[in-house]
Image (spheres, rainbow, N blue to C red):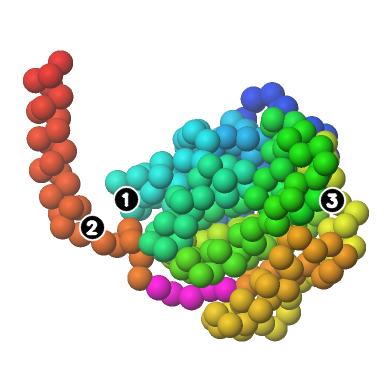
Amino acid sequence: MNMNPKDLATTAKNSWCPGCGNFSIMSAMRMVLAELDSQGFPVENVVLVSGIGCHAKIVDYMNVNSFYSIHGRTLPAASAIKIANPDLKVICFSGDGDSLAEGLDHLIFAAKRNIDLTMILHDNRVYGLTTGQYTPTSPQGFKGKSTPSGTSEHPLNPLELMLVSGASYIARGYTHGIEQLQKLFKEAILHKGFSFVDVLQVCVSYNNLYESYNKWTYTVQGNDASSFEEAQKIIRSWNYDRSEVPIPLGKFYQIEAERFDQSFPEYRQNLSERDSKIKTLLENFI
Ligand code: SF4
């Protein structure tokens, strides 16, 4: 029997602001997981991992195995889950503050290792949960609680960082384009390697960019996603600082590459023996 996306809802009270882009990300992910479940990719084999921030509540609202980690530490927890049980599909949710500030080193290393994880970046370009401070993707001049006169820093381009670090699937979506989000999420989940989807997730309360994104986003067509140079050119065409310029959406890069999670065959062969040793140790300890 086909799974209904509503089966993946929980009874937890939702505390996101009305109009928040997080709703689109959650709906798209529920639809994709229900569809994949119906296609022989059981939701029981999926684990969701989140960090800290408004995005993180998504794991409370999805009836899927999940792990709520600490700030910036989504990827270490997700990597451990994947390495311990490579049959699981681990999907990470993180914010731009969570992953690009507190957790930046983990993000770079996950891409460098090309570990088989999917990272969905809720990129609202502001710290929403703590009421409006600038993050690494806020544009220069962004005025918030911590920068009332405007930040003097230029933003990071997370996709450029992912490309040069070794991520093997890179895409961008927008929370006003739920069909595209579904397509990109499905591709990213089925991709073997580190897949990174930057989602322009609008924070209606502290950085409402709907008008700007509605005007300037477009979907790339006919690009060669296997070309590093082409992906770099598309990714560099918008650097998060400039406004009033076209903002590309879609899949920019996808290649096959060696994966970190395939590097432990010897460990896995000895896993049951080690498991029994650990069990004996714990029994003696107790
Ligand atoms: Fe969404 Fe912003 Fe409200 Fe957080 S503060 S729930 S990101 S609209």
Residue 98 lies, with reference to residue 138, above or below; the image says above
* Residue carrying label 1: 83
Q: Report which quarter residue 21 is drawn in.
A: top right
Cβ of mark 1 under 8 Å from ligand 1: the answer is: no
Residue 222 position, x and y percent, is 70, 83
Tag 3 secondary structure: loop
Residue type marked 3: Leu
Mark 2 highlights which residue?
Answer: 264
Badge 1 amino acid:
Ile
Q: Which residue does the image show at 64% across and 25% down from the upper left?
A: 12
Give the number of the disc on residue 209: 3
Q: How many marks?
A: 3
Q: Quadrant of the C terminus?
A: top left
Q: CA distance from mark 2 to mark 1?
A: 8 Å
- In the image, residue 144 sits, relative to residue 31, either above or below, namely above
Label 2 secondary element: loop
Q: Amino acid at mark 2?
A: Phe
Query: Which contiguous range is marked in magenta?
Result: 253-257
Residue 213 lies in what quarter of the image?
bottom right
Label 3 beta carbon within 8 A of ligand 1:
no
In front: mark 3 or mark 2? Answer: 3
Q: Are marks 2 and 1 in contact (CB under 8 Å)?
A: yes
Q: Earlier in the sequence, mark 3 or mark 2?
A: 3
